[in-house]
């Protein structure tokens, strides 16, 4: 009969050579660290654009003494944490205090590799030790408030309770049917805003600079302006041409000589 999962010696533990060896092996294995859930106590980084750092963690599965009383673990310091990163491309989400994640412990001393950030001999003869841990999270996390969500129907949702910032020398938005932008206020800031298609506005459009229209301009509401309007072609209002209209005989224009016949085109 073996001890199974019982960590303490029982009368049958030394009943023969086999049970004695099993007990010894089990005790040796219990002294080795493999993987366990841990709680983050602190992190060297806080979401900034910096290299990956380290976390201090507390193992959550208590040790138990000979009387069956819990013996909580002490904090393990300086575990490198993982990040979704390939080369210089990364998704930066640093661990936060209180996160529950997975700590795994290397089979050999990794201290020299951590110092050199490259290939190195083991720093000592220790094996499967708590000092050689690596952290990866998060497990058993709560409901996030800022997230990227991939849904079953193929929709990719990006949500932030504050702001979403996209920065690049060039940003392309390509859609097969439509691009929807919805907000109480939409600001377009640039030296030039260009479109090669139609622009339809159901509400107000305010332009602080110049607006150049290469095609037609259809306005169903009221257009007001504090500056000048320049058109290379003619402008027609309620069927009357601005450039080619005539004044009837007797029409009077302030500051001009009354006409006796139809006037010519405006000059």
Image: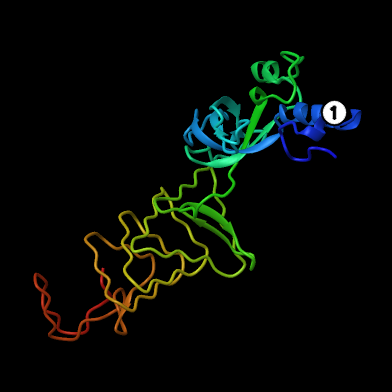
Residue 253 position, x and y percent, is 12, 75
Residue 11 position, x and y percent, is 78, 33
> Position of 253 compared to 171: left or right?
left
In this orientation, which residue lies closer to the viewer: 118 or 135? 135
Residue 155 position, x and y percent, is 60, 64
- Residue 66 lies, with reference to residue 145, above or below; the image says above
Q: Quadrant of the N terminus?
A: top right
> Position of 134 compared to 249: left or right?
right
In this orientation, which residue lies closer to the viewer: 241 or 32? 32
- Residue 45 lies, with reference to residue 254, above or below; the image says above
Q: Residues within 10 Å of mark 1 (few under 14, many from 20)?
A: some
Q: Quadrant of the C terminus?
A: bottom left
Residue for point 56% across, 31% down: 71
Residue 68 lies in what quarter of the image?
top right
In this orientation, which residue lies closer to the viewer: 77 or 153? 77
Most extreme residue toward the left is 255
Residue 86 position, x and y percent, is 68, 37
Residue for point 9% across, 69% down: 255
What residue did someone put label 1 on? 20
What SS does tag 1 mark? helix
> Position of 22 compared to 37: left or right?
right
């Amino acid at each position: 009969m073996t001890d199974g999962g019982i960590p303490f010696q029982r009368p049958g533990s030394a009943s023969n050579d086999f049970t004695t060896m099993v007990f010894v092996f089990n005790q040796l294995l219990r002294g080795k660290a493999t993987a366990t859930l841990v709680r983050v106590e602190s992190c060297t980084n806080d979401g900034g654009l910096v290299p990956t750092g380290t976390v201090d963690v507390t193992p959550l599965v208590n040790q138990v003494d000979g009387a069956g009383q819990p013996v909580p673990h002490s904090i393990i310091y300086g575990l490198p944490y993982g990040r979704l990163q390939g080369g210089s491309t990364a998704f930066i989400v640093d661990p936060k205090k209180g996160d529950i994640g997975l700590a795994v412990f290397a089979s050999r001393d990794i201290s020299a590799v951590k110092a050199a950030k490259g290939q190195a001999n083991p720093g000592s003869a220790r094996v499967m030790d708590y000092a050689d841990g690596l952290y990866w999270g998060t497990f058993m996390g709560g409901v996030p408030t800022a997230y990227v969500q991939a849904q079953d129907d193929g929709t990719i949702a990006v949500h932030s309770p504050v702001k979403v910032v996209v920065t690049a020398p060039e940003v392309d938005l390509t859609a097969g049917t439509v691009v929807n932008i919805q907000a109480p206020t939409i600001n377009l800031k640039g030296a030039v805003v260009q479109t090669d298609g139609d622009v339809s506005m159901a509400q107000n459009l305010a332009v602080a600079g110049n607006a150049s229209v290469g095609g037609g301009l259809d306005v169903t509401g009221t257009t007001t302006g504090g500056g000048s309007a320049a058109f290379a072609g003619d402008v027609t209002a309620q069927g009357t041409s601005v450039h080619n209209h005539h004044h009837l005989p007797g029409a009077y224009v302030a500051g001009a000589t009354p006409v006796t016949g139809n006037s010519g085109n405006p000059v």
